[in-house]
Image (tube, coloured by chain):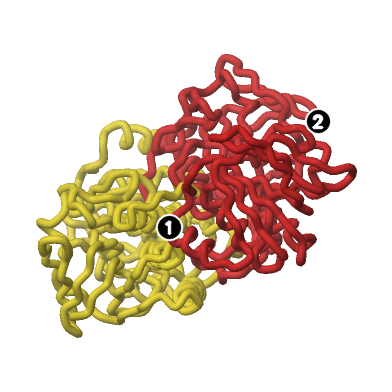
Chain colours: A yellow, B red
Amino acid sequence: MKNTELAIIGGGIAGVSSAVYAQRAGLECALFEANTIGGQLLWMETVDNYVGVDAGIRGLQLAESLKKNIQDLEIPFFPHAVKAVTPEEDSFVLTTDKGPVQTRGIVVATGARFRTLGVPGEEELTGKGVSYCAVCDGFFFRKKKVLVVGGGNTAVEEALYLAQFAGQVTLVHRRDRLRAMRSLQEKLFSQENVEILYSRTVEEIQGEGAVNGALLKHAETGENEVLPADGIFVAIGVTPVTELVRGLVDTDKGGFILTDQEMATSRTHIWSCGDCRKRPLRQLITAASEGAIAALSVYRSLRGGYISS
Amino acid sequence: MKNTELAIIGGGIAGVSSAVYAQRAGLECALFEANTIGGQLLWMETVDNYVGVDAGIRGLQLAESLKKNIQDLEIPFFPHAVKAVTPEEDSFVLTTDKGPVQTRGIVVATGARFRTLGVPGEEELTGKGVSYCAVCDGFFFRKKKVLVVGGGNTAVEEALYLAQFAGQVTLVHRRDRLRAMRSLQEKLFSQENVEILYSRTVEEIQGEGAVNGALLKHAETGENEVLPADGIFVAIGVTPVTELVRGLVDTDKGGFILTDQEMATSRTHIWSCGDCRKRPLRQLITAASEGAIAALSVYRSLRGGYISS
């Protein structure tokens, strides 16, 4: 059976940063990613807020840089899907699609998926006006007309965030009232450039090469209308990819892994970082930082070393 | 009086990342840095662990990227030294060398400085053989005899760096063992031109116009000895640059600013990030992440919004 000291599961920026720091700290590590290195970067048109990198870099190009980071440090990389994690006495056995791997420690960096609407036009126009993150992309919609889809806290937060610079924000919600907390709702109602359309579902996102509107359907009357828009922010939630460690580590009710500040989970020798972890700010730069912190925690725990800088 | 919503003090990577997120969040911000943008990057030969950027990038080049981040977003940048912070009822007044500035909130990202030994000869001979940065000055000691003072990671890393081209490296540590991580120690022990002197303190740095040696005292026997040397690298840690907010916010006994996970200090509307803050891992990537988190905390606090992603 293949054997390693630290298995890092997930090849997004959190996992790669963790692998870089683990390798440089002298840990014997192995990075597992069944798909291409890059995680959500693979779906990002451009990245504009990763400080130190020029704004406007393509997501794919930053993903290529992550690959180069791995290659330059000769980090052992395995394009295997990890199917199960089984705790043993002093280690864990990973069941992968290429056989079992024994490891002393695990960094879970499996990320999350944005919930999508699943309507025509959504996939094609992602990065071309369709976005899942106002903090990432809102800046491009100065004075523009944007739609936010959803009715929970995230949707209302994103609408408020966008209302600061967008010309007009329309919140589209499928129910006849919002789910968001009242204080947020009140704040939203007080915005002059925000309109709320209740009881509408988005049936289609329209545009050729760039979003120009959405087809809405009224839940009660069944009537259709086309709403012109330059951008559509889908804010109907995020699902963490944490089935692998379900029951092994504590999560919140949404399935996000709970950790302390050092990225340690409730189970000894399992750490977590990035979007699969419960965290206040879901950004590339925070994920990369958490990966580094996790790796040094592993180092301290497995090697008994100490490092402060 | 000049007026702004958010003053970010310090143009290292923490301050710049904070400015990028603040500007993109629609906050009216102003970045203050009396010197060149880049902070400690200006003293780093290369950077090898900032994931997403190719290993081996020169510190100055990464500093240039930070400048470009600021220019691209048209972040208001002021090359003014901030001399004092005075709290007013609902705001703060910054005293700068170009006049006062009123601001609602402050992000303190003033970084840290290398710690000095405080012994005779040190100050006079700084730049004449006494250095705090092997990467900056090591080149001048080709085939020469150098001392490195300290026992932590930085000291061992600096000794390893210098061993590449100096004739002889002597690590002087006041304790009977090193604090550095084991893999670094092992690497150090394997160097042929490195000697380690334990349980010695540096009492004086000697030389007229140029270092020619150090007076060492044995911690147990009390015996003195003079060790000839062409260069002395002091690697005993860093001191936060936090005089500006002394008495205004809580710090630890070392002067590092205490914050919560959202980078809020003990005083409402003052946040802190980067090396001036008490933090477990002092790295570029963690500083950049903290800058982003601080900016979104400011947004939530000053704009009453809330944003979770």
Name which residue type carries label 2. Answer: Lys
Residue B295, position in %: x, y? 50, 42
How crowded pointer 1 is (Cα within 10 Å; few <14, some 14-19, many 20+) is rated as some
Q: Nearer the viewer, mark 1 or mark 2?
A: 1
- Residue at the spot x=17%, y=64% of the render? A91
- The disc, 1 or 2, on the residue closer to the chain's N-terminal end is 2
Residue A284 in the image, given as x and y percentages of width and height: 44, 59
> In the image, is residue B207 above or below residue A23?
above
Could you confirm whether marks 1 and 2 are on the same chain?
yes
Determine which of the numbered discs, if any, sits on residue B182 in the image: 1
In the image, residue B262 lies at what x, y percent?
41, 38
Q: CA distance from mark 1 to mark 2?
A: 49 Å
In the rendered view, would you say B26 is above or below A73? above
Q: Which residue is mark 2?
A: B98
Residue nearer the viewer, A281 or B53: B53
Q: Which mark is residue B99?
A: none
At mark 2, the secondary structure is loop
Please provide percent x and percent y for residue A218. 22, 57
Chain letter of the residue carrying label 2:
B
